[in-house]
Structures are given as structure tokens and as C-alpha cells.
Amino acid sequence: MTDPILGRRSLGFEAFGASVGLALVSGGLAIVLPFLAALTGTLCALAVAAWVADRRHRSAGRRPTVARLEFVAWIWTGGAAAAFLDPPPAFGPYRAVALALGLAAVWAAGRRVPPPGNAR
């Protein structure tokens, strides 16, 4: 939720970070409990939707840009998504955690990029 008067987040809750964190937990547990891979995939889809919504909100009225480090992280996430959907036989138990780690890289790269208008 965003405070309409002050323009800042009032609850301190970020959907992208929360869903990536939960995907990491469920992805790690999916190594032992394989049925949690579906939950990890769902949380990762939620994380992508939250990233897109946040990016559109931040760049309202401007052309959205993606930093180079974020772009590399998204390429890694795309490879992890391909391995999640069609894993090699030996990689099967680790596919969920690999997908979550790819989005964790996007989250970490996004933290290093200053928000638009706050460049130093």
C-alpha cells in the first residue's frame, strides 16, 4: 500500500522481495519434498508480476530502463526457468531452488540500482 499524500509505502511490505524470499524457502524444501516445486514456481510467477508492477510504478511517465546487472540476472533467471520446465534427469530435485536463486539474483541486482530521480 502506498500513502497517497506522502507518496511512500506505509506498511513497508514489498511483494517482490517477500515472494522471492518465500520461493527460496520453498525451493530449498522442494529438494526434500518435491511437491513444493509447484509452490516455488507459483511464488516465482508472483515475483515476476510484482517486479513488473513495481517497475511500471517507478517509471510512470518515463521510459522504463533495466540496469546491466539486472539484465544479466534476468538472463540467468531465464535459464533457470527453462531448466525448471524441462530439467535434465540429474537436475530434477534442484530445479525449484535454481529458479528461486535466479530471482534472488534479480532482487540483489535491483537493490544496487538507485531509483530513478535519485541518481548521485
Image (cartoon, rainbow, N blue to C red):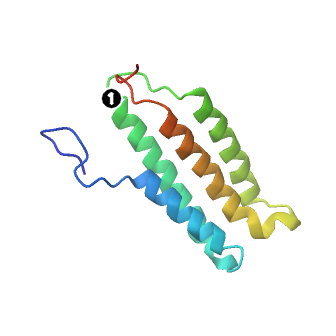
Q: Residue at x 67, y 64 (%)?
A: 96
Looking at this view, is 52 or 3 the one in front? 3
* Rendered location of residue 72, percent (x, y): 66, 35
Using the rendered view, name the quadrant where residue 40 is placed: bottom right
The relative height of residue 68 versus residue 86 in the rendered view (above or below) is: above
Q: Residue at x 66, y 56 (%)?
A: 99
The residue positioned 71% from the left and 79% from the top of the image is 32
Q: Amino acid at mark 1?
A: Ala
Badge 1 crowding class, 10 Å Cα cut-off, few under 14, some 14 to 19, many 20 or more, is few
Q: Secondary structure at mark 1?
A: loop
Residue furthest out toward the top: 120
In depth, the one of 45 and 66 nearer the eye is 66
Would you place residue 43 above or below residue 70 in this image? Answer: below
Q: Is residue 87 above or below residue 55?
A: below
Residue that extends furthest to the front in the rendered view of this protein: 120
Asked which quadrant contains residue 38, the reply is: bottom right
The quadrant the C terminus occupies is top left
- The number of numbered discs placed on residues in the rendered structure image is 1
Q: Is residue 57 above or below residue 45?
A: above
Q: Position of residue 50 (x, y in %)?
A: 43, 49
Seen at 53% across and 56% down, the residue is 45
Q: Residue furthest left?
A: 5
In depth, the one of 43 and 73 nearer the eye is 73
Residue wearing tag 1: 60
Q: Measured from the top left, where is residue 108 in percent x and y?
A: 55, 44
Q: Is residue 13 left or right of residue 86?
A: left
